[in-house]
């Protein structure tokens, strides 16, 4: 019997726990604050930002959205981030990607202080993850780890095959699971004979954005399949990178699209923001005792 690993129930449970933590922080005169920056008029980006703001406010996080015109200059954006770095009411800073061509994405992400980098993209946090040290972990990979834990899937000693090598999902999720003693292989657009590799996976994670790329003949019987894809078909239906209806008959566990990994991404953003607020409180306590 295949287990369908829904993320929405776990996300709801975690958000309830975070709301309680926010109430406890309020007793110490701390309200977690999240600033989200969006540049331009991209419809999908604006939708994501609105969802993030609503989710944050629902559990008591102070949310500040800063919207800028497509023509914004890079130095103006960097100056705005510098102000937020110094703002004691803001514990987490998120820049919605993509950015207009005149702005260097790398420079922008590196300008966010690592202590407020709740997306986990700053090189210092990337390095901490690589060295298995405490730091902020990118939200989607972190959500995948939480889901695997929730469904009792132990990755130690398992062969994890990841299709996709982005800095947002593929690379960090591989590092997270390597830190938990998995054997990790990466596949990408230059990989020869993708099927040969996916058939070796005890746990297959797919994050490339190609509808129904993975079919039943590409997985071994009993594999765990995590689908991070999210593609809108012309019919309006949302599908993942995995042919769910086919693959579910062969997998032991599989995430659906929607209601799978997606709800966990924003939940982990809220988690990281509350964590940042707690860390700022601890830093304030240390400073007061110096």
Image (cartoon, rainbow, N blue to C red):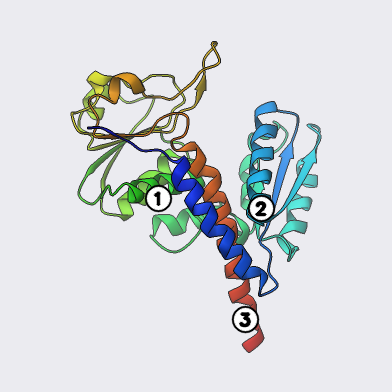
Q: Which mark is residue 107?
A: none
Instruction: Please tell me the numbered disc located at residue 146.
Output: 1
* Of residues 119 and 34, the one drawn nearer to the viewer in this rendering: 34
Q: Residues within 10 Å of mark 1 (few under 14, many from 20)?
A: some
Q: Where's the C terminus, which quadrant?
A: bottom right
Whole-angstrom CA distance, mark 3 to mark 1, is: 30 Å
**Place of residue 231 in the rendered image (x, y in percent of width and height, measured from the top left):** 50, 22
State the separation of the CA atoms marked 2 and 3.
Answer: 22 Å
* 236 sits to left or right of 78: left
- Of pointers 3 and 1, the one earlier in the residue sequence: 1
**Disc 3: CA contacts within 10 A as few (<14), some (14-19) or many (>=20):** few
Drawn side of residue 209 relative to residue 78, left or right:
left
Residue 14 in the image: state x and y as whole percent: 49, 53
SS type, badge 1: helix
Q: Nearer the viewer, residue 156 or 26?
A: 26
| Quadrant that contains the N terminus | top left
- First along the sequence among labels 1 and 2: 2
Residue drawn 67% across the image and 56% down it: 61
**Contact (Cβ within 8 Å) of mark 3 with mark 1:** no
Q: Mark 2 vs mark 3: which is more N-terminal?
A: 2
Measured Cα–Cα span from mark 1 to mark 2:
22 Å
Residue 60 position, x and y percent, is 66, 57
Q: Is residue 4 above or below residue 287?
A: above
Q: Nearer the viewer, mark 1 or mark 2?
A: 1
Disc 3: which residue: 285
Looking at the picture, tell me which residue is in the foreground, 1 or 197.
1
Q: Which mark is residue 93?
A: 2
Instruction: Say what secondary structure mark 2 lies in.
Output: strand
Mark 2 is surrounded, within 10 Å at the Cα level, by few (under 14), some (14 to 19) or many (20 or more) other residues, namely many
Which residue corresponds to the image point at 45% horizontal and 44% vertical from the top-left?
9
């Amino acid at each position: 019997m295949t287990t369908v690993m829904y993320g929405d129930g776990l996300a709801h449970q975690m958000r309830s726990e975070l709301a309680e933590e926010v109430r406890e922080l309020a007793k110490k005169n701390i309200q977690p604050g999240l600033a989200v920056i969006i540049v331009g008029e991209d419809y999908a980006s604006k939708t994501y930002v609105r969802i993030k703001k609503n989710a944050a406010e629902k559990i008591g996080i102070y949310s500040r959205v800063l919207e800028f015109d497509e023509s914004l200059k890079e130095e103006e954006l960097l100056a705005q981030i510098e102000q937020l770095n110094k703002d004691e009411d803001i514990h987490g800073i998120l820049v919605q990607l993509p950015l207009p061509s005149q702005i260097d994405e790398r420079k922008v992400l590196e300008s966010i202080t690592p202590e407020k980098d709740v997306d986990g993209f700053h090189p210092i946090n990337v390095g901490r993850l690589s060295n298995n040290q405490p730091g902020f972990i990118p939200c989607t990979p972190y959500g995948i780890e939480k889901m695997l834990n929730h469904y009792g899937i132990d990755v130690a000693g398992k062969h994890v095959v990841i299709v996709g090598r982005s800095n947002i999902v593929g690379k960090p999720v591989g590092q997270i699971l390597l830190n938990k003693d998995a054997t990790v292989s990466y596949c990408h657009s230059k990989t020869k004979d993708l099927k040969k590799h996916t058939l070796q996976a005890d746990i297959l994670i797919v994050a490339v954005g190609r509808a129904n790329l993975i079919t039943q003949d590409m997985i071994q019987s009993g594999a765990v399949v995590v689908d991070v894809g999210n593609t809108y078909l012309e019919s309006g239906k949302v599908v993942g990178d995995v042919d769910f209806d086919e693959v579910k008959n062969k997998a032991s566990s599989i995430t659906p699209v929607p209601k799978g990994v997606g709800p966990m991404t924003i939940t982990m953003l809220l988690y990281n923001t509350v964590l940042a607020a707690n860390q700022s409180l601890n830093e304030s306590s240390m400073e007061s005792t110096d």
